[in-house]
Amino acid sequence: MLQEADVRTIIGKLKDPFLHKTLAELEAIEEIKINPEKGHVSVKVGIAKTGTGEQLNLQQQIVSLLKEAGAASVGLRFTDLPKEKAVSFTEETNESILSGQNKTTFIAIASGKGGVGKSTVSVNLSIALARLGKKVGLIDADIYGFSVPDMMGITKRPEVYGEKVIPVERFGVKVISMGFFVEDNSPVIWRGPMLGKMLNNFFHDVEWGELDYLLLDLPPGTGDIALDVHSALPACKEIIVSTPHPTAAFVAARAGAMALKTDHEIIGVIENMAYFESKITGEKEYVFGKGGGEKLAEELKVPILGKIPLQQPDWNENDFAPSVYNADHPIGQIYSEIAMKVADLI
């Protein structure tokens, strides 16, 4: 039967998902109880942030390792590490997500103009990638027109440990937005340099942890903030969002040209609001015309990743997220297909 020292050795090598230090280094294994007759092992573990998807992943790892070592059953309790301890280790792990050691793939979601549903695409593509088992972050870089927290139904704000901000997690996606730092939906009246500094903070002062993808919901057009993002991320993939309307596609081509001039790789076009399909007759109506997505993709020499129709998500009053499509919703399934294409391309 496992002994307490065995349990400490086995799980002590696992890392806290936020502080990236082993449980042994953090002295996070607070209690171990073993019932030799039943083969039951009970463990109490402290981590930097409880109630997250990362906690669930760590839980699965602990249970799996202990059962492989001979435990018949495993009981787990997670508690928050003392804030002083979390702060001290956060200060030690002050590495920016832009550091050369980071393996995160950056994906900017851009559009030539507002009103084409770029933020909706950013939110649902992020969630679709997370549903594929990817570790995903989302920066709401549309600092004047931030909308991601509201779209995802996020009501709490980030916590701060030492010098690092811990992003809010929702639907398996870590989110940071200007919307978390203003009161009562106030307008942002800062000038360009101040906004650029705020965006820089999103990269350097947020504890993102290990991510497969970090998506950026860019402001529409080719203004200062979009240019700051292009300058800060020399190795970045980009997806251009447009409607089928010829003018929207024409303007979106400018965003594509900007990406190419800053050496960003455009991986595809998403045509949003492609058509409206009647639930009664099944007939498709092309409200904004046809052909804009194809024209834009041809001009940029990239594929169309998907065409998303006009349709409202299914709203759940108990867990309200007004712009999020469920995985089994027809549009949610389209986003899943797009996410798989994106993962394959990258």
Image (tube, rainbow, N blue to C red):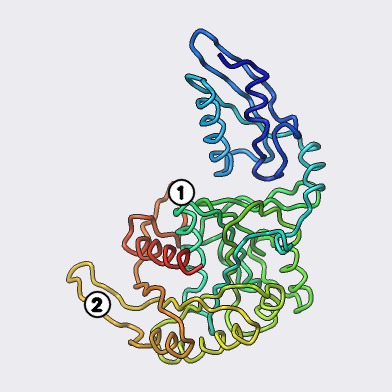
Three-letter amino acid code of the residue under disc 2: Lys
Depth check, front residue: 253 or 39 = 39
Task: Find disc 2 in the rendering and name its residue.
Answer: 284
Rendered view: 247 above or below 307: below
Mark 1 or mark 2: which is in front?
A: 2
| Drawn side of residue 285 relative to residue 11, left or right | left
Q: Quadrant of the N terminus?
A: top right
Labelled pair 1, 2 in contact (Cβ < 8 Å)? no
Depth check, front residue: 74 or 149 = 74
Furthest residue toward top: 37
Q: Which residue is drawn at the image coordinates 54% and 24% (left, top)?
A: 69
Element at label 1: helix
Element at label 2: strand
Residue 340: percent from left, percent from top: 42, 63
Structural distance between the alpha carbons of marks 1 and 2: 31 Å
Quarter of image, res 79: top right
Q: Which of marks 1 and 2 is nearer the N terminus?
A: 2
Residue 145: percent from left, percent from top: 60, 72
Three-letter amino acid code of the residue under disc 1: Asp
Identify the disc placed on residue 319: 1
Q: Which residue is drawn at the image coordinates 61% and 23% (left, top)?
A: 43
